[in-house]
Amino acid sequence: MEGIFVPIGFFLALFAILYVYWTTRTKERLALIDKGADASIFKGGESKYALLKWGIFMIALAVGVITGYALSGVIDEVAAFFTMILFCGGLGLIVAYLVTSALLKKE
């Protein structure tokens, strides 16, 4: 019986967060409409290189998992996976930034 409280609490918290997010967003947009302002500022379009960024990031995470597995024989397994996933993920984001900025300069 006690094991059911964690999933119920998780989904209640998730519902509460989404409810507050959507009601706040609606109130902001209605306030802009009342003042006569344009609500197009909320249409923050993704850049055309968003998929490239996510692809590089996911590949870097996979490299981090593989590197963590390779290091798990040398150091603690949890520390190896945790540090390598974070390190390679951050490195992947830096590489994605450099690649997308170079592509944007080319245009």
Image (cartoon, helix red, strand yellow):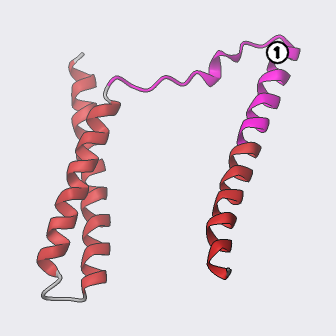
On the image, the x and y values in percent for residue 47 come to 39, 25
Give whichever of 90, 61 is nearer the camera: 61
The reply to whether the magenta stretch includes residue 50 is: no
Q: Position of residue 40 (x, y in %)?
A: 64, 16
The residue identified by callout 1 is: 33
Please say whether residue 76 is visible from this viewpoint: yes
Where, by quadrant of the figure, is residue 11 drawn? Answer: bottom right
**Quarter of the image holding residue 32?**
top right
Q: Which residues are magenta?
A: 21-48
Overall secondary structure of the magenta stretch?
A: helix
Left or right of 7, for residue 31: right
Tell me: 3 left or right of 60: right
Q: Position of residue 5 (x, y in %)?
A: 68, 73
Above/below status of 39 relative to 99:
above
The crowding category of the residue bearing disc 1, from other C-alpha atoms within 10 Å (few below 14, some 14 to 19, many at least 20), is few
Q: Position of residue 85 (x, y in %)?
A: 28, 65
Identify the image quadrant of the N terminus: bottom right
Outermost front residue: 1
Q: Is residue 36 magenta?
A: yes
